[in-house]
Image: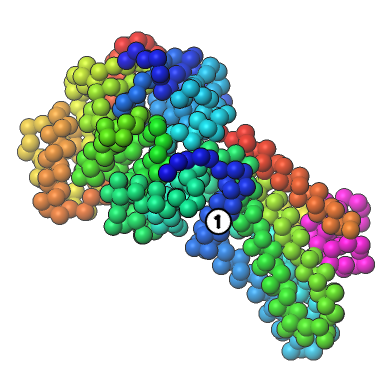
Amino acid sequence: MTARGLSGGQATLAIARLAIVRAVRGKALWIAAATAVLPLIVVGVQASLGHTAETMWQTAFMLTLLTLPIVPSILIGPSLSDELEDKTSAYLWSRALPRWTIIAGKLAGLAPVAAAIAMVSLGVAWLVMGGPGKVPVDTAVRGLAGVAAPALVASALVAALATLVPRHAVAVSVVYLLFVDKVVGELPIKLRYVSIAFGGRSVAGFDDLAAAPGALSLLVVGSVAVAIAITRIGRME
Amino acid sequence: MSGPATAIVEAERLSKWYGHVLGVSDVSWTLPGGVIGLLGPNGAGKSTLMKLMTGLLRPSRGAIRVLGGDPFADAGVRRRIGYSPEHEHTYDELTARELVTVLAHLAGVPRAEAPRAAVAALEAMGMTEAMDRRVRGFSKGMRQRTKLAATLAHDPELLVLDEPLTGVDPVARIDIIERIKKLAAERGKTVIVSSHVLYEIEALTEDIVVIYRGQVLAEGNIYEIRRLIDRHPHRIRVECDRPREVAAAVAGAEHVARLVMERRALVIETRDPDRCYDDLAAAIVERGVELRAMTSPDNNLGAVFEYLTGGREGGEA
């Protein structure tokens, strides 16, 4: 047996696997998954009351977008902040790993889970309201992209916040995404492009918004968040 | 303890401070191989020094070289070090086997070989029976053994163990000490162990470095410092389900200077800690008492260090 050292990619994968196993065996994943039921319940009630497909689709999308502050916050926030607060990071930092792999690994493992939860939530709601017969497939696909992309970007933002304020990562993330981000996204000025919720609505094609600027703004916000997280963790002692 | 040509750790005017708080102050010394004990009261700078050795911290001033390289900047150096932190937090959702496997892999053991390395390390630490149980349900002793297994699974040259015996019951303590000594003797590892309890260090090695207020106060053979410490009463705190029974069992012993009962705990002051530990172990085992923790508050050690420094900061012993 020889310890030869891992490449950045190998280390990222190993940390991603570790993050997923811990999430599956902990409570966070199941709490996150439970929030995904909310759109289904509301759409089910609307269907029984005879609401139009357009209303139900809009409701399902907005409610899924509303769960975004919760899902990445409780999945990624504790995964990083507990590591820093409980000092288990010592196990990782004392090993021959580049520090950026800790952020990359957590995000590679858990951000797709957050996106999948959002997509399953909206996808099942779409089927409940009648599927392709009620809402065209291309609209549904844009809607799914419109919740998946913000889920990924919100995950990156939560990672950045967890490295900035590890002790209060979940609370700060939820408050920011639920209030600040949502409010900024409703502003009738260009500042709204920094809003993750606005980016999601653009990608999904709501309010006659073009997808490309929204997708680009999400990419920029996500990249900045990842850069902050990696810079912060590289300097931590 | 003058350093040979191939020093394991070399510190040169090494300082580390956190804001206005000093962790390590202007330390210059060389550590050779073997088993070396870092002794000092809580807050003396032992953990800071170990974190500097293992690359968790960057020096504020001066330099530290471990195995010939800079542990903070050089991942190749960290691959040759095994570090067991002071705290007992681990990834509690995992089994001991999974935990040690993933940490071995992250330390550079190829993924296919990591499970075998983990099992060997856990077996070496006496965790064969419990390796498929989740860490969450482990006692402090089992956690320490699992941490030690994770420390050595990637076969490092240098083991840095921060308070590996804290909170461990007497039987497990003896067992862990023997296993650490075996690692050094049979596998030729260099082991640096910290403790605030002289008697733990004494059981491991004669070579000690005394740290106090962030400085190396003394280094060399343990017997002189022991003689000084034995002049002061030594306190042992026993947390168990029936502290009064344990108190009654040891109360008559001549080495017991004072007994203080707390809620679900007993604090003993003794002038002969070796005998006191033996008597306590016998009393606990004979009566089937459920032991939760046995710790040694370090106020007495602090008093000795104050004595050694003559009340000055950083005096030479």
Closest to the observer, B95 or B278: B95
- Is A54 located above or below residue B120 in the figure? below
Residue A50 shown left or right of residue B216 in the figure: right
Quarter of the image where one finds residue A84: top right
* Crowd band around label 1 with a 10 angstrom C-alpha radius: few (<14), some (14–19), many (20+): some
Q: Quadrant of residue A70?
A: bottom right
- Chain identity of mark 1: A
Q: Amino acid at mark 1?
A: Arg
Is residue A153 rendered to the left or right of residue B294? right
Residue A97's place in the image compared with A55, above or below, is above
Q: Position of residue B153 (x, y in %)?
A: 40, 44
* Residue B257, above or below A214: above
Position of residue B61 relative to residue B281, above or below, is above
- Please give the residue where the numbered disc 1 appears in the rendered image: A17
Q: Is residue A94 magenta?
A: no
* Segment colored magenta: A184-211
Instruction: Please provide percent x and percent y for residue A93.
Output: 53, 39
Query: Residue at the spot x=23%, y=42% of the render?
Result: B175
Of the 4 image quadrants, the one containing the C terminus of chain B is: top left
Identify the residue at image location x=34%, y=24%.
Answer: B33
In the orientation shown, which residue stands out farthest toward the front?
Answer: A1
Residue at horizontal 36%, vertical 20%?
A: B32
Horizontal side of residue A208 vs A61, given as left or right: right
Q: Residue at x 55, y 51 (%)?
A: A14
Q: Is residue A191 magenta?
A: yes
Q: Return the x and y of residue B7 as percentages of the image width and height.
A: 40, 19
Q: Position of residue A119 (x, y in %)?
A: 71, 69
Question: With B192 as the anchor, is A83 left or right in this view?
Answer: right
Q: Quadrant of the N terminus of chain B?
A: top left
Q: Is residue B110 visible?
A: yes
